[in-house]
Amino acid sequence: MTKKPMKQRGLGRGLSALMADVNEDTASPPEGATQRPDLLVPIEKVSANPDQPRRSFDKEKLADLSASIAEKGIIQPLIVRAKPGREGEYEIVAGERRWRAAQMAKLHEIPVLVREFTDIEVLEVAIIENIQRADLNPVEEAVGYNQLMDKFGHTQDKLSQVLGKSRSYIANSVRLLQLPEEVQTYLRDGKLSAGHARALITGDDPAALAREVIKKNLSVRETEKLAKTSAGNIFADGSKTPKAKLTPAKDADTKALEGDLSANLGMKVSVDHKPGEESGRISIAYKTLDELDDLCRLLSASR
């Protein structure tokens, strides 16, 4: 197949533009239609991205995809870039699963969309593509968000807008990386849910609490109660009575919201929400009159 004129796309694209490339790759064409590729390339001329963040591929799902490709071919072309210094060879930007499945199906040629990407953009797109997949475990997803913020300077607000996730969802996801490696392993293996893990962040010894949660098969609500006690006394033999608290402990999501608001305002924010009710109270503490003036300006500007 002859090569079509490539779309001119400047380098240094923003996240929205990169997402457009990923969505072009992941969006399903109308039923019975095939997406037109730029080229049909011998499969041996295409290689995987060596910096691909994802290293593991589900063998069963890969076999299912291979069977589908053997019957119907590759409906959605892979996104590739020309391999530097290797005429006629290409490196995968998005679509490695299809490439692997096509090899299993013994295809000789694969359809591709050729795009211009820098090394940094290739890594960025690979992370975005992985996040868009529904089969990431909570730790892989959190690592993806963290990489997009740390490596590329994207804010939680920007990721929220482009990826269609709420800001609090992204913030709570990234907070999972604060947990000890043992707890993260339980998350990867599916022994704990993200809800369990968020509750454990506030505990004194998350790893010990995680083992207790798994052993007793506790619910998320029970895990929150466990994390609020210094030594899991609510599940002990009753010989020790937990110390009374003047106010109930706040759950992990409320604490995360307080942290986000405090960071944005530069002032200490307290959120008091009564469990089971819709109402609550937000308190903002300022240290100087200048901070009070800043707060007044922010509130006035939002009208």
Image (cartoon, grey):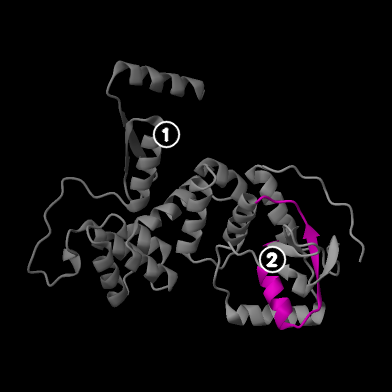
* Membership of 114 in magenta stretch: yes
Q: CA distance from mark 1 to mark 2?
A: 38 Å
Residue drawn where x is 63% and y is 52% of the image: 119
Q: Which residues are magenta?
A: 93-118
Q: Upstream in the sequence, badge 1 or badge 2?
A: 2
User: Is 128 situated left or right of 229 in this image?
Assistant: right
In this picture, is 165 found above or below 39? above
Q: Secondary structure at mark 1?
A: helix
Q: Nearer the viewer, residue 265 or 74?
A: 74
Residue drawn where x is 69% and y is 77% of the image: 101
Quadrant where the N terminus is found in the figure: bottom right
Residue 191 locus on image (x, y percent): 39, 73
Residue 187, located in which quarter of the rendered image? bottom left
Residue 239 locus on image (x, y percent): 7, 69
Q: Nearer the viewer, residue 109 or 68?
A: 109
Residue 241, located in which quarter of the rendered image? bottom left
Disc 1 marks which residue? 264
Amino acid type at mark 1: Asn
In this picture, is 3 found above or below 236? above
Label 1: how many Cα within 10 Å (few below 14, some 14–19, many 20+): few
Residue drawn where x is 79% and y is 59% of the image: 113
Which label number is shown at residue 288? none
